[in-house]
Amino acid sequence: MKLSRIPELDLLRFIAALAVVFFHYAFRGYAADDLTTMHYPPMEPLARYGFLGVHLFFMISGFVILMTAGDASIKKFIVSRAARLLPAFWVCCTITFLVTLAIGGDRFTATWPQYFVNMLTLGGGFGADPIDGAYWSLGAELRFYRLVAIVLIIGQIGRSERWLFGWLIATVLVEAFPSIKLKTFLVTDYAGFFIAGAACFLIRAHGLSRSRIALVCAAWALSLYHEIQLLPYFSEHFGLDLNPVVIAVVMTSFFAVLLVLALRPTPVFTSPRWVWFGALSYPLYLIHQNVGYMLFNAVGSAIDRDVLFWGGIAAAIGFSLLLHVGVEKPVANPLKRKLAYWLEAVQSYGAALRKRARQ
């Protein structure tokens, strides 16, 4: 079912990306692993919770991907996702790699083989580490796409609600019985977020039902469980305790906002300008972390801390705008056509091989 775009989702994307930027710049880079000399104490009490922005990303992704996949073939799905992810990633990965070679110093290193693996896999694999620490979430996204692709291939996207329930139950079983070796395949650490977003899309597309409300509530419980599981790691790695009440309130607010958007028939924000916020979120997420750390380290105390902190954020947003206008927009449609042509050629070649094998 084709539904109109929801401008509020674009704003939520940008807020999620900005929360992650604050987490890295004001807290994470200085608090652990000696990544940067930069920290910003005025923002630290709030910024330490900014990592939750990634999980909001996952919820929005669940909503949007199911919305775009509903009327798509597997070929269209692959083409649309590749055209969306690849151009910005290739540019940001290349820039991060070159900046690392230039000013990475002792804190940041990268090799050419690592770079090529990152460019091929969107963030590492085959024994190579990500060029940038922020790329870890792309692995979770790609595993989610794989699950959606499987449902498309077997022709079950119209029955996605029952498959979401199956995913949820399988995730709970894997969490309860670690001997079931499907944790990575089922993206169990983040399944609740993707399922919640997808369930909210089903509510928007088909209306409320007991089963969909049950799905959202179960996904909420699973997501809170995941967040609580993070607390010991956070305490050990960063040397401070997070307030579980704050986490619960923030996470619950994510679910409430997405549910309200699913139930609201018309958007609050009608201006097409809100689309720009969503467009900036992906390149902003990709480029800000390691490049920001390295630039902070290179500048040191030569610039006032307030100017450096807010200037770094403004520069990251400005670069994201340039990347969207200069690369993503002009490249997207030609890349879609080229990818569709290649997939069609591969499909035709495969059909010819099967026909020859039967003769």
Image: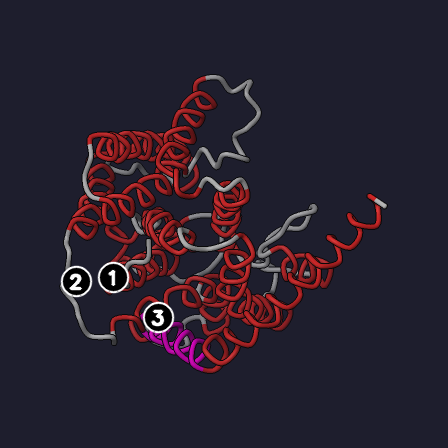
Spatial distance from mark 2 to mark 1, Cα to Cα? 6 Å
Predominant secondary structure, magenta span: helix
Q: Which residue is mark 3?
A: 313
Q: Which residue is mark 2?
A: 267
Say whether marks 3 and 1 touch (CB < 8 Å): no
Spatial distance from mark 3 to mark 1, Cα to Cα? 26 Å
Query: Quick one: label 1, few (<14), some, or many (20+) residues within 10 Å?
Result: many
Q: Is residue 343 magenta?
A: no
Say whether marks 2 and 1 touch (CB < 8 Å): yes
Which is more N-terminal, label 3 or label 2? 2
Which is more N-terminal, label 1 or label 3? 1
Q: Is residue 318 magenta?
A: yes
Mark in front: 3 vs 1: 1
Magenta stretch: give its range.
308-325
Q: Residue at x 35, y 49 (%)?
A: 51
Determine whether 273 is above or below 281 in the image. below
The mark found on residue 6 in the picture is 1
Determine whether 117 is above or below 89 in the image. above
Which is more N-terminal, label 1 or label 2? 1
Please, what is the three-letter code of the amino acid marked with disc 3?
Ile
x%, y% of residue 317? 36, 73
Q: Residue at x 32, y 58 (%)?
A: 2
Say whether marks 2 and 3 touch (CB < 8 Å): no
Secondary structure of the residue carrying numbered label 1: loop
